[in-house]
Amino acid sequence: MSADETAVRGFRHWRRQRPFIGGLLVAIGGVEMFFSGQLDIGHLHVQLGIEGLQATIIPIALLLLGILAITMPAHHVFYGILALVVAIYSLIGVNLGGFIVGMLLAGTGAVLVVAWMGPRDPAPAGEPEEGAS
């Protein structure tokens, strides 16, 4: 087995121990919101909120919540609920939630983080798994 295969296998094992896809979607939604809040369309600067403070704080919060959900899976429900609340609030705080796309990415990721069930425990030796006949 080569070093690359070992690294891929190790990453796959690490990824399955945490809500990786949900946290990644929350972080991507935050990045998308950040860039949608910094748009310049001709002479029109698209930015809503209190002098643009919300357009910076909300995406950073979503990025941080996504990273925390991945790195600290024991608190996934707390981070997922916070991310969902922030994603919904971004609808009025950050250019319609990053033109709806960022809000949908972060909201979907937050729901996946909350719904994550954790790694499956392997069946003890000698006992058949559920559903096996």
Image (cartoon, grey):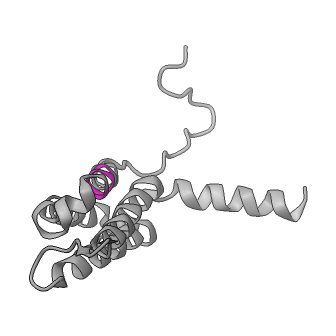
Quadrant for the C terminus in the image: top right
**What x and y, as percent, mark residue 100?**
24, 53
User: Compared with residue 133, is residue 56 higher up or lower down, i.e. above or below?
Assistant: below
**What x and y, as percent, mark residue 16?**
54, 53
* Residue 105 lies in the magenta-colored region: yes
| Horizontal side, residue 43 vs residue 89: left or right | right
* Camera-nearest residue between 96 and 74: 96
Q: Main secondary structure of the magenta part?
A: helix
Q: Examine the image and state in which quarter residue 26 appears.
A: bottom left
User: Compared with residue 86, is residue 58 higher up or lower down, i.e. above or below?
Assistant: below
Please report the residue visible at 62 percent of the width from the left and 56 percent of the height from the top: 13
- Can the viewer see residue 84? no
Quadrant for the N terminus in the image: bottom right
Please report the residue visible at 54 percent of the width from the left and 19 percent of the height from the top: 132
User: Compared with residue 28, is residue 45 higher up or lower down, i.e. above or below?
Assistant: below
* Camera-nearest residue between 89 and 83: 89
- Number of marks present in the image shown: 0
| Horizontal side, residue 42 vs residue 28: left or right | left
Q: Examine the image and state in which quarter residue 97 appears.
A: bottom left
Please report the residue visible at 45 percent of the width from the left and 72 percent of the height from the top: 71
Q: Which residues are magenta?
A: 102-108
| Horizontal side, residue 79 vs residue 128: left or right | left
Please report the residue visible at 22 percent of the width from the left and 77 percent of the height from the top: 55
**What x and y, as percent, mark residue 130?**
47, 25
**What x and y, as percent, mark residue 84?**
20, 59
* Camera-nearest residue between 64 and 43: 43
Residue projecting furthest to the right: 1
* Residue 87 lies in the magenta-colored region: no
